[in-house]
Amino acid sequence: MKITKITNKNGNTVYRSQIYLGTDVITGKKVKATITASTQKELKRLARQRQETFNLNGQTVHKIIKADTFKELSALWFDTYKPTVKPQTYKCTRCVFNKHILPRLGDVKLIKINTPFCQDFVNKVSASGYKEYKSVIAFVKRVLQYAVSLQLIPFNPILNTIIPKVRRNTHAQQKAKHLTQEEVKQLLDYLDSLPPTYANQYDTTLYKILLATGLRINEALALTWSDIDLDKSTVTVNKTLIGDTGKVGTPKSQSAYRTISIDKKTVLMLRLYKNRQAQFFKEIGFTSRAVFATGRTEYGTRPNTQKRLDKHLESAGLGRFTFHAFRHTHASLLLNAGISYKELQHRLGHSNISMTLDIYSHLSKDKEKEAVTFYEKALNSL
């Protein structure tokens, strides 16, 4: 086997060889393969592997998969990735690639992607300020490993890179957005002062149930009346809207399936809203069991409901926030009232308690002062 030593412009050395695999039993043509590796030992190992693969396949080449650039490779990877995840996860992954990966790597040829190149990519992504930079690196690692399995590259060059430890200013880092008690009161007072139209009752019920349960907005919009037991004062989460499609899917994780209790005031509000909805739908000739059906579609969508929320916040004299702020506010109110993190984990549908602790471990000023009071009581009891 003739081995050629090649030194690239950047000083990196690779070894390349063209080997003869045999005669294809189907086409009758001689089959050769070009192999490249970082060491001669690795080159010989890959040559043996390629020969064994050719023999195991019945001494024929079934299909040659080609991908010259990272963009072409990622397209092949997405074909295998899509059936393994939920549509919303696939959509989010696509967004990550389009925004953070393909602009940097898309047009780069696979033969140019070596360890120094990957280290430079890792450094730049880490310094970009994108807080999920490790996920970006992990996706690139998976795609390149897929290339190895397709024998498009000899090894995964990003495996030998070092991920920089990014130090962030914890004081400047934005905490989970939640409303203060004063802001909650201001919002509730505003909602109670609205004219008693069905649209206002729809919005008020949605906002108050989000505050009372901590549901994700798409979990709330997917609720049907069969999910709410007004006699037992419970709400069961067993589905969610898929992104902004208006279609229903399964919750994001097994722990997201849950049944939580609600207070008597919220139960009364839901009873009144249910009766008003039935009357309104009868008037317009619409039928639906969805709690937040719009009267035109079975389920409301987040973009439309966010637009209405923006208008209400402006009228209430409050700054803009997204629906997730209701979830954080629910958690904040319960923590300050003394709920345990384990119970909060269940109500929010987190897969593990570390997620709950990471997001909500910061105490409010009132709770922090309360901690001092407990300490003083403990000392006095000695």
Image (tube, rainbow, N blue to C red):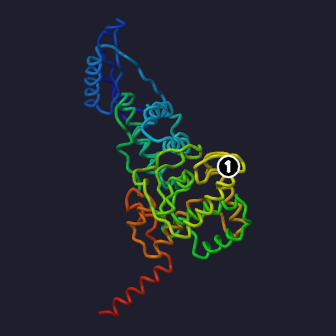
Instruction: Tell me where residue 26 sits by quadrant.
Output: top left
Provide the residue designation for mark 1.
Answer: 295
Instruction: Name the quadrant of the C terminus.
Output: bottom left
Name the kind of residue labelled 1 in the image.
Answer: Gly
Percent coordinates x, y for residue 133 in the rendering: 47, 51
What's the residue at 68%, 55% (across, down)? 279
Residue 70 or residue 350, whichever sits in front: 350
Q: Residue at x 54, y 51 (%)?
A: 224
Is residue 160 shown above or below 235?
A: above
Q: Quarter of the image for the N terminus: give it.
A: top left
- Label 1 neighbour load within 10 Å: few <14, some 14-19, many 20+: some
Q: For this rendering, which residue is in front, 365 or 108?
A: 365
Residue 58, position in %: x, y? Answer: 28, 14
Disc 1, SS: loop
Can you say whether 349 is above or below 150 in the image? below
Q: Residue 375: x percent and y percent?
A: 37, 86
Picture mark count = 1
Looking at the image, residue 245 sits to the left or right of residue 74; the answer is right
Q: Position of residue 344 (x, y in %)?
A: 43, 66
Residue projecting furthest to the top: 28
